[in-house]
Image (cartoon, rainbow, N blue to C red):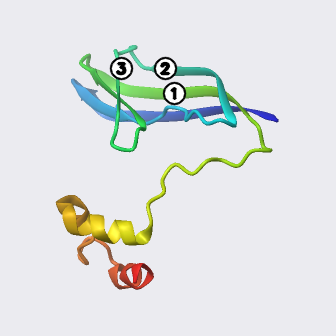
Amino acid sequence: MAIFKIVHLTKYQYNWPIKESINEIRLFPHHFDNQDVLQYQLLITNNPEVEISQDYFSNQVGNFNTLEAHTEMTIESRMLVRVNHSLKIPEIDHTTVKDFAKEKEKSILLLRLSYPETIKKQNEISAILD
């Protein structure tokens, strides 16, 4: 068993005052059978209210606005987690390459992301998928 202290810091510095900043963050710890989140703290300049929701894959997503004029903004995520190494980290997604190929045909966004002008190595990616 091991305990890890994890700190993630993002700092924005601007050359002139920014009047409004709209942000989305994904700095939340995952909860697994073999990982206990002992402490978690999110620190943001000016302490804005963060609305937390879940995305399509059940990841936590935070959204916040900073309306005050500022030349610097810091977002800090701090956590203390205990991990039991005797257990394997569970698979989150059971999607296969074939599933992705089918999904690509149905999704305009995925189709757009797979255009050759968007991905420089599309031929290599297609060869791997085949």
**Above/below status of 116 relative to 14:** below
Asked if labels 3 and 1 touch by Cβ distance under 8 angstroms, the answer is: no
Left or right side of 117 for 81: right
Where does residue 7 sit, x and y in percent of width and height? 61, 32
Q: Which residue is the site of mark 1?
A: 76
Q: Quadrant of residue 11?
A: top left
How many other residues sit within 10 Å of disc 3, few (<14), some (14-19) or many (≥20)?
A: some
Q: What residue is pinned by disc 3? A: 50
Asked if residue 113 can be seen in this view, the reply is no
Amino acid type indicated by mark 3: Val
Asked which quadrant contains residue 55, the reply is top left
Q: Is residue 119 visible?
A: yes
Marks 3/2: CA–CA distance: 10 Å
Taking the view exactly as shown, the residue that stands out farthest to the left is: 108
Front-most of 122 and 128? 128
Q: Please name which of the two marks, 3 or 2, marks the residue nearer to the observer.
A: 3
Q: Residue at x 49, y 20 (%)?
A: 43
- Residue 2 or residue 14, whichever sits in front: 2
Task: Measure the C-alpha gap from mark 1 to mark 3.
Answer: 13 Å
Amino acid type shown at disc 1: Glu
Does 62 sit above or below residue 48? below
Q: Secondary structure at mark 1?
A: strand
Tell me residue 8's x, y (percent).
Answer: 56, 35
- Whichever of callouts 3 and 2 sits on the residue coming sooner in the sequence is 2
Q: Residue at x 68, y 30 (%)?
A: 81
Q: Which residue is mark 2?
A: 43
Residue 106 position in % (x across, y down)? 20, 64
Viewer-proximal residue among 49 and 75: 49
Indicate which label's residue lies in the foreground, 1 or 3: 3
| Element at label 3 | loop
